[in-house]
Image: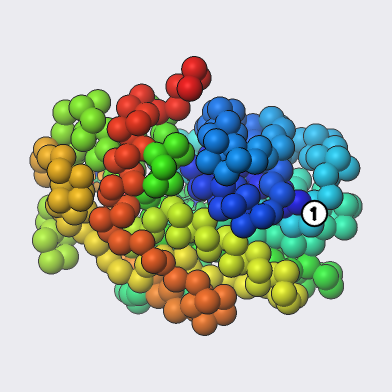
Amino acid sequence: MAILVTGGCGYIGSHTAAVLTEAGREVVIVDSLVNSKALVVNRIEALTGRRPAFYKADVRNEQALAEVFETHPIEGVIHFAGLKAVGESVAQPLAYYSANIEGAAALLRVMQRQGVRRLVFSSSATVYGDTDIIPYTEDLPLQPMNPYGRTKAAVEWMLTDLYHSQPGWSISILRYFNPVGAHPSGLIGEDPAGIPNNLMPYITQVAVGRRPELGVFGGDYPTPDGSCVRDYIHVMDLAEGHLAALGLIEGSHGLFVHNLGSGRGVSVLEMVKAFSEATGQAVPYSIKPRRAGDLPAYWADASKALRDMNWRTHRSLADICRDAYEFQRQNPKGYVETT
Ligand code: NAD
Ligand code: UFG
């Protein structure tokens, strides 16, 4: 039996595909490569000694998806495929509604027809939006503040309605906090196109000399050092969370919602300091104006994941920094087609 990993060439999907393969699972990847490269499949093979099956296809292409289900004995799906840049979602909402909502609907229709009813879905802490209640618990109302977040909330509602409409579905919704770091081998990691939007890839690109300095967006937030506080989670801990979630939906029927985070808030300036200490690389930075839409501080209450599926993070901030740097050091220009 196999697990279909949509978006499996991407950042979180590739690490999850590697963890699943290491755990003895058969992995089948479907990815349109809109934000990733096919050579990631070679890297997963190099890491694990087993090559996942790979199909270049858009999840909105129901015909192509159906062929994958007819070729492999798929018993469950982890759905990563989608678009994820908040700023881009404000500029191009229709592209986000199509990729994220139509993509999920197409996948669910095919699963329904094929009789496969186990799904793990990549949601995001961004669905909580602005709230004074910190840390975030899963029972907070969803009030997303941007189109990207609204597509994630919409898919969560779609999954909830589907679950209640028909017996047999078993669904895990995972709300990730800030995924960072890389596989400790340095073979797979985060490889954003263009100028990184996110903090950690920006830091690693500064560390290898691709960019002169980090801009810290805001130094006057009501936080201990004035910079924003987030809950950073090592991508390998996150990948292991998917294995735990699969175990949960395989062991029982239900609709489960879990935060995946460390439960600890870390500021931008603390991250810069931790990175320099862990890697020995200086990260020049200057304080810039606040970035529109950023919340001052939030982190996860991750106790439900510990209770329900015995999952928690194990890796430290130093592990995160060292592993992120190792990927960037080995791949200074990201994934390059000849490697
Ligand atoms: P990513 O862009 O690296 O991976 C997404 C993958 O999906 C890419 O390989 C891309 O080519 C593929 N894809 C996109 N649209 C597709 C489509 N229509 N059909 C087939 N393939 C498609 O992103 P990631 O960071 O690995 O994120 C994975 C998932 O986790 C996304 O759903 C994202 O919204 C969610 N998430 C990410 C973060 C984060 O900070 N990275 C936080 C919370 C949630
Ligand atoms: N930051 C900088 N400089 C940079 C980049 C980021 O100071 O060059 C700061 C941001 O202002 C923020 C923090 O670093 O305070 C983290 O920013 P990221 O862009 O790395 O992450 P966000 O917390 O903004 O958002 C991330 C994902 C979203 C997801 C959200 C969920 O990018 O997709 O986490 O919590 F929805």
Mark 1 CB in 8 Å range of ligand 1? no
> Which residue does the image show at 15% across and 51% down from the upper left?
277
> 229 above or below 258?
above
Please name the residue that numbered disc 1 is placed on.
1
From this viewpoint, which residue is outermost toward the bottom? Answer: 307
**Left or right position of 93 against 319:** right
> Which residue does the image show at 45% across and 54% down from the upper left?
236
> Which residue does the image show at 73% across and 76% down from the upper left?
252
Which quadrant does the N terminus fall into?
bottom right
Residue 221 image position (x, y, % from top left): 16, 59
Residue 263 image position (x, y, % from top left): 35, 71
> Which residue does the image show at 65% across and 44% down from the upper left?
6
**Left or right position of 236 against 229:** right
Amino acid marked by disc 1: Met
Assign a secondary structure to mark 1.
Answer: loop
Q: Nearer the viewer, residue 10 or 239?
A: 239
Residue 299 image position (x, y, % from top left): 34, 67
Residue 69 visible in rendering? yes
Q: Nearer the viewer, residue 130 or 184?
A: 184
